Structure formats: C-alpha cells, structure tokens
C-alpha cells in the first residue's frame, strides 16, 4: 500500500526524524489560510501516489498567501501520471546548503532489508544505481535488531566527513531503519535529506510504501489508505480478496493464480487480442468471489467477452462453476463467455456448466484464448 | 530418485482441521503420501481421515517420527507455525499460506538457517514427486513419473505446464512451486542444484515471472554450473509497470524486473524460452532428444 508524503512525514516525526511543519489542504481557501498562519514562504506540494511531482509542476514555492492560493488553484485537480491531485501539503520553505539521499528497501536476493545512502540527494536513485553505482553506500541490517550504530557511522561518515553533520545523519539512519521495521515497510525513503545553512538536518520529502500482507498488524496504518487514489472496482476487488488491475483491452479475464493470470493475458496478446484486465480470484475461492469478479468485469464498458481460465488446485472448479451459475442468474450477463476449467473437481464443474446458454467450453488454454479472441472481434 | 520428498517422507499437516487443510490432507493421502499426523492446537485426539491430530508439532514428531511438514494455517499464525515445525526438528517445511508479512519471513529464514531446516514457500503450491509423494495443493492426477524436474514461482501456471508435459508424454521427477513472495525459503538456484545432482532428473523446466532478479541469477547459474538442459518460460510480458500482479513479488519497479529482461538473460545463458505455455512440451522433447 502506498501512503502520501504528509502521512509518511507524520510517521517519521513520531520516530524522531526531523521533518518540517506542514498542513494538508483540499481547497484553495484552506491553502491561503495555512500559508497566512505560517507567515513565511511556503511550498505547495501535490499529494499523489507517484513520483515526478516536481517535474510535472505539482510542487511550487509561494512567497505569500495569495501566491500560495493561486498555485493551489492550479495544482488541485491537476493530473500527474494519471493521478488526480485532491490534496496538497503546505509546508514552510527551508534554505538548503546540501541535499543527501537516504533510503531503505527490502533486498529480495539477500533476504534482508538494505539501507542505501548517497552524498547527492534529490536524485533518481535507480538511475544513479545504474550509471554511478559507486556513489551509493549500502548496508544490510536485521529488522529485529535494527541498524547497528557502527553501520550507521560507516554510512554517515562515508557521505559526510564533517563530524557534526555525520552524527546527525547516523542518528537519522538508525531511526529510519527502526521505522521501516516497525511499520513493515517495503520502502522508506528520505529524498532529499537537507542541511540548512545553520547546519540542521531536515527530511523535506518522505516516502513510505507498506507491505500489504502486514496490514493486519497495523490498523492505524490501514486507516491511512486513500481510497480516492484507487478505482471503485479495484477497491471492491480488494475487499473481496481478489486482485484486479484494469487494462485497456476487450477480453475480460477471470483466472486463478497470479502466474496463470499473467500467462493468460500474454496469450491473449499472442493470439492477436487485448486483455481488459488482470484478475486473480486467488486460492480457496468461494462462489461469492466469482460473482464479484463478473460484476467488476462487466462494469468495464470495453469488455466484449469474458474468458475463464481456471486450473484447480486449492481452487475447486465446482466452486467456480457454482459462482458462475449464480452470477449469471443474478447479474443478467449478456456477454459471451468462454470457460476452461481443469483440475480439482473438474468433472463436477463440467456437469454444473453442462447446459448454460452463451457459454463456450474449452479444453485447453490455447483453445480458450483463441475462441475468446475470435468472439471479441 | 527425486528431490526433497519421496515415498519415505513422513508428513505432518499443520492446520489439518481447517477447510483447506482437511480437503488437501484427504487429497494427499489419496495420492499415496505417507501422511502420519496433523496438528491443530486444542484438537488432539481427533482424527481427519484416520490421521491422528496433535496439539503441537513436537507431539506429532515424537509420536509419529514426522520429518516433513506442510503449513495451511492463516497468515497471522503462519510465522509461528513455521518456527514451531523447525524447532520440533522437522527437516523440510512447506508453507502454502499466502499473505505472510515479508519482514516476518526475514526473521523466520534467519532462524531456519541456524536450525538447518529447509523451507519451501511461502505462498506456494508445494511440491510433488509423482507416483511417490505429494506435499501441497496441486491436482495429483495431472502428473506422471519421469525425467523432468519442474521449478516455478507460480502455482496454477505450474499445473498448466505439467499438464502439457504429461500430455506430450513427458513425466516429471519432482515439481516444486517455490512461491510468489519476495522473500522465500528455497530459490531457483537451490532447486536447480538439487536437480543437477539428482540422477533421475535429465532436464528441467524453469517458470519465472516479472519482479526481482531471481531468474537472471538462475540463468547465470545454469550457464556456469549446470550440465542438464533447462527450458524456460516467463509470465508477465503484458504486465504494466508499478502494479503488483497478484503475487507480492510480481511487480516491475523502477523499470527493472521486466519479462523482456528476464527472457533476454535466459536466452543469453543458452536456455530456450517458450513464447507460449504450449511450446514448453515440444521444446522439452527437443532438449531430451526425443
């Protein structure tokens, strides 16, 4: 799950990481009032779940409340990489002497969290990792013990020789790593951490991504979910335990298992069609999941045919077939359906689906996909 | 021969009285798995399909000599269940459960490495040595004993591939789903080296997907360390970047982990890559010289 910058800053603030003051606003008037209250130059920052906000014009400096209001007028409602800006963070501007990069990710190959630092902040870390890997210092750490102080010193002195500054960076690094472990993060990033002319360190940007699987531990963080940032269908799917991603094509796919769902989309493309979505109905599926899946897919106006590709293991084909029958009677689906159900309880499923009108059975994945591509034409 | 499990494996099911645990225990037993015990705290003395249920894994191991465990318990209790099996001295733990927090798995794996217990999964279908033993949720009847090892990050896509191999007349030594999570106990390279050492396995099918760099690392291993032929498939060529495709580990982030990159790495290592799943059978026939 992604959270917004202002939410990540709140988490950092509670962890003892220095962040600037700031208030969130959803209207131009609020922005004017907040800026007046700060009584100084402010930065108005779009709160959307994507990078590149600055380049897109979503982060602007204002010298007075009127200017801030004018900027908010432009930024609120703006679209950045497909995300509509509904909230802005208004925060006092700070003077910058230097920018550093601090970030924590989960290193899949090593099976441990990895903290990375660079002397140059405000950068695209993935780009630097490719073009100038030597500019990034790295340490793995154990989430249960956190980053050891000596590791923090190695990293901090590695990017900042001045002891007074390095000590502050080391302290922030330890807190950042602790924070990453406490929230079950998949990413925690300060880009940039800045040094003021007075020698103070401040995290002027903040990014945290959370592990969806860990949210059951963290109801406070689950409450930070911005449901306006996901589509109604994506939210409905998530609540039902389905994973759904909308694409632009005409063939609505209902598949069990993520790998098979991806392979089905790929095969649709291979045979000249275009998938309308990724949809994994998951393991141990109940008929209700299938009903939700059909409802979500039929709400997509581009869909011309529904393709079921089910290979039963933990998912039982008879459950899927029952769900399909109930969904057909409950939702009056008019679209043609191609269904291929193989594996656990496939015989029962075949009997259940035997006489359904408008349903084309298929034996193999190739056959099912080719039939669906033809029907979509 | 086969790898990790065979007819001698003594299997205990953790979560045997749950809906999925009970269903798949019956299926495993019907397949011929030597299912010796089940565990559900508070349900000792019950039986599921004649299999005795114990309160703890330690009891099950002491009473039945179980050496392999399969975990069907819900995510919130799965970390503890895996650790319980490892501390009870189980040699191999297979975690079917989807949705265990990644940082919990970091902690679990550190402990398992110390105790010398192997974990397969989590978020996986388990493994099967056809004709001998099935530990997991795959439909047993699609498999056939034979010379090809199968290793995959997926569940149902693995069944699809196995189904195609069997229809082509090619049997399998062992099929392993290593799991779709970012942090897993047994990776491609671990399994490839076991297949390389197994005399019954003559060739391997490796099924990858978007996200991470495990396929690239495996390709390097195949090129430098393996004598047996490997055939590959990568799912997710049409996956949009930045979106998690069902599996917690299946995401293209920062432009890396794409299917195109992985196919390129496999091809560069001399591994023939099937463009679509139904090409795997014919490519494997060619690799085996049939």
Image (cartoon, rainbow, N blue to C red):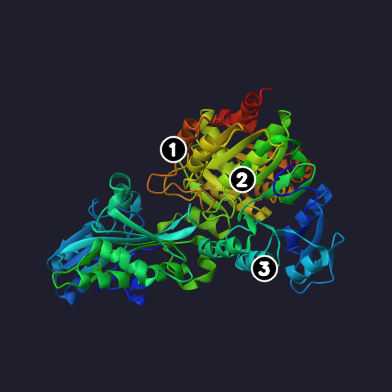
Circles 2, 1 touching at the beta carbon (< 8 Å): no
| Residue B73 coordinates in the image, percent (x, y) | 67, 63
Circles 3, 2 touching at the beta carbon (< 8 Å): no
| Residue A340 coordinates in the image, percent (x, y) | 67, 37
Chain where mark 1 sits: B
Q: Is residue B289 visible?
A: yes
- As displayed, is residue B24 above or below residue B156? below
- The mark that comes first in sequence, 2 or 1, is 2
- Residues at marks 3 and 2, CA–CA distance in whole angstroms: 24 Å
Which dot, 2 or 1, sits closer to the camera? 2
- As displayed, is residue A31 above or below residue A114? below
Chain where mark 3 sits: B
Locate the C terminus of chain B and report the quarter of the image it occupies. Answer: top right
Circles 1, 3 touching at the beta carbon (< 8 Å): no
Q: Residues within 10 Å of mark 3 (few under 14, many from 20)?
A: some
For residue A108, the mark is none
For residue B191, the mark is 2
Q: Residues within 10 Å of mark 1 (few under 14, many from 20)?
A: some
User: Residue sitting at 69 percent across and 32 percent down?
Assistant: B165
Q: Is residue A336 visible?
A: no
Chain where mark 2 sits: B
Q: In which quarter of the image is residue A30?
A: bottom left
For residue B87, the mark is 3
User: Residue sitting at 14 percent across and 73 percent down?
Assistant: A198
For residue B261, the mark is 1
| Residue A141 coordinates in the image, percent (x, y) | 43, 64
Which dot, 1 or 3, sits closer to the camera? 3
Label 2 element class: helix
């Amino acid at each position: 799950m992604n959270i917004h910058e202002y939410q990540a800053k709140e988490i950092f603030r509670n962890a003892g990481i220095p962040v600037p003051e700031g208030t969130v606003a959803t209207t131009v008037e609020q922005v004017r009032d907040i800026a007046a209250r700060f009584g100084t130059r402010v930065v108005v920052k779009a709160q959307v779940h994507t990078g590149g906000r600055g380049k897109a014009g979503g982060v602007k400096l204002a010298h007075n409340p009127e200017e801030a209001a004018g900027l908010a007028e432009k930024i609120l409602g703006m679209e950045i990489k497909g995300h509509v800006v509904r909230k802005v963070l208004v925060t006092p501007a700070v003077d910058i002497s230097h920018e550093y990069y601090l970030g924590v990710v989960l290193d899949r190959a090593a099976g441990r969290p990895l903290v990375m630092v660079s002397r140059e902040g405000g950068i695209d870390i993935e780009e630097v990792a490719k073009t100038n890997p030597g500019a990034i210092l790295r340490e793995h750490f154990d989430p249960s013990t956190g980053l050891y102080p000596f590791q923090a010193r190695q990293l901090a002195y590695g990017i900042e020789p001045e002891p007074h500054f390095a000590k502050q960076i080391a302290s922030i690094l330890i807190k950042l790593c602790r924070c990453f472990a406490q929230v079950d993060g998949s990413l925690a990033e300060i880009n940039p951490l800045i040094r003021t002319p007075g020698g103070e360190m401040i995290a002027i940007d903040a990014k945290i991504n959370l592990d969806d699987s860990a949210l059951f531990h963290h109801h406070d963080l689950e409450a930070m979910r911005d449901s306006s940032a996901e589509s109604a269908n994506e939210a409905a799917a998530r609540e039902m335990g389905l994973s759904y991603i909308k694409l632009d094509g005409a063939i609505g796919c209902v598949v069990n298992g993520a790998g098979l769902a991806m392979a089905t989309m790929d095969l649709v493309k291979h045979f000249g069609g275009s998938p309308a979505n990724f949809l994994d109905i998951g393991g141990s599926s109940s008929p209700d999941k299938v009903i939700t899946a059909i409802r979500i897919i039929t709400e997509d106006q581009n869909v011309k045919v529904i393709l079921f590709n089910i290979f039963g293991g933990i998912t039982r084909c008879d459950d899927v077939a029952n769900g399909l029958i109930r969904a057909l009677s409950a939702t009056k689906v008019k679209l043609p359906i191609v269904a291929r159900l193989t594996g656990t309880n496939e015989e029962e499923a075949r009997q259940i689906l035997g006489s359904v009108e408008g349903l084309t059975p298929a034996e193999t994945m190739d056959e099912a996909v080719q039939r669906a591509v033809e029907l979509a034409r | 021969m086969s790898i990790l499990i065979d007819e001698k494996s003594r299997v205990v099911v953790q979560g045997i009285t749950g809906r999925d645990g009970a269903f798949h225990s019956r299926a495993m037993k019907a397949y011929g798995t030597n299912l010796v015990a089940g565990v559900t705290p508070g349900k000792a003395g019950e039986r599921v399909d004649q299999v005795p249920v114990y309160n703890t894994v330690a009891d099950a191991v002491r009473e039945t000599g179980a050496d392999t465990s399969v975990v069907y318990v819900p995510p919130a209790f799965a970390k503890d269940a895996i650790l319980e099996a490892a501390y009870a001295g189980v040699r191999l733990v297979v975690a079917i459960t989807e949705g265990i927090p990644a940082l919990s798995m970091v902690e679990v794996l550190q402990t398992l490495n110390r105790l010398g217990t192997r974990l397969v999964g989590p978020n996986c279908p388990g493994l099967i040595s056809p004709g001998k033993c099935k530990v997991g949720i795959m439909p047993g009847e699609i498999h056939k004993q034979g010379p090809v090892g199968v290793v995959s990050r997926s569940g149902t896509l693995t069944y699809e591939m196995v189904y195609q191999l069997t229809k082509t007349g090619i049997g399998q030594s062992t099929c392993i789903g290593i799991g779709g999570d970012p942090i897993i106990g047994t990776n491609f390279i671990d399994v490839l080296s076991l297949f390389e050492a197994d005399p019954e396995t003559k060739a391997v099918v490796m099924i990858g997907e978007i996200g991470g760099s495990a396929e690239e690392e495996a390709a390097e291993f195949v090129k430098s360390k393996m004598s047996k032929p490997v055939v590959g498939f990568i799912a997710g060529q049409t996956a949009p970047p930045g979106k998690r495709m069902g599996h917690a580990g299946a995401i293209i982030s920062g432009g890396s982990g794409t299917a195109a990159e992985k196919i390129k790495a496999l091809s560069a290592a001399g591994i023939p890559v099937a463009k679509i799943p139904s090409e795997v059978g014919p490519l494997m026939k060619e690799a085996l010289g049939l």
